Image (cartoon, grey):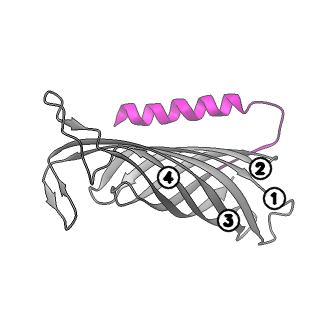
Amino acid sequence: MKKLLLFVLLVSSIATMSYSQPIARKYGIELNQFMVGSGFGTGTELQIFAADEKGKRLSVGLYYDHQYGKIGGLSVSFLKMLRSNNKPNIPILEPYAFYNFIYRKTTIVESTISENYIVSIGTYKSMEHHLGLGLRTNITKHLYIKGELGYGLYLGSIMKPSKPDEVLNESSGTNGSGVLAKVGVGFFF
């Protein structure tokens, strides 16, 4: 867990340095609830972000797994606003395009049986890549809400796991594609 937190801090510092051009920046924090098609269920992500005046934003954060009650990985997203709102205190809908990446590592200590699948004891890894469109609206000058809908690929699934490695007892699962649906709230500093 400490390595994961250090990784997030390293990536965010690198992103901040790469954004060190003489352009006005805004920083903030965002809390999102999302659902994906890879079988891991719903999750919550807490992200910190840097946004520039041209409408580009890079976010890095941690993913919290509700089903197992612990931090299950990290998430990175990049978005580009399709229309710029020069007056952030006016609540209009602002469309944007996004790319979202989620890395998960989940350890199952008790097998689960469902209608469609059986989850065996072991460690499951997944990397998910999604592209899509979203809408954001400002509540106040610093507070906004948003919604996203996208589609992408997942490399690893908990619903259809591959045979676990005999030494490590880790399964990468099967690959596929699925939908990403996300709602969230954010705050600019």
Decide whether residue 9 is among the magenta residues: yes
Query: Along the line of sight, which residue is nearer the eye, 157 or 123?
Result: 157
Per the image, label 4 sits on a secondary structure element best described as strand
Comparing labels 2 and 4, the label whose residue is closer to the camera: 2
Residue in the image at 18% along x and 30% along y? 168
Q: Nearer the viewer, residue 137 or 140?
A: 137
Q: Position of residue 59 (x, y in %)?
A: 59, 45
| Residue 55 numbered tag | 2
**Mark 4 belongs to which amino acid?**
Leu
* Disc assigned to residue 141: none
Lower position in the chain sequence, tag 2 or tag 3: 2
Disc 4 designates what residue?
A: 46
* Few, some or many residues within 10 Å of mark 2 (<14, 14–19, 20+): some
Residues at marks 2 and 3, CA–CA distance in whole angstroms: 13 Å
Q: Which mark is residue 135?
A: 3
Which of discs 3 and 4 lies nearer the camera? The answer is 3
Secondary structure under badge 3?
strand
Left or right: 141 with respect to 135? right
In the image, what residue type sits under mark 1?
A: Arg
Mark 2 to mark 1 CA distance (whole Å): 8 Å
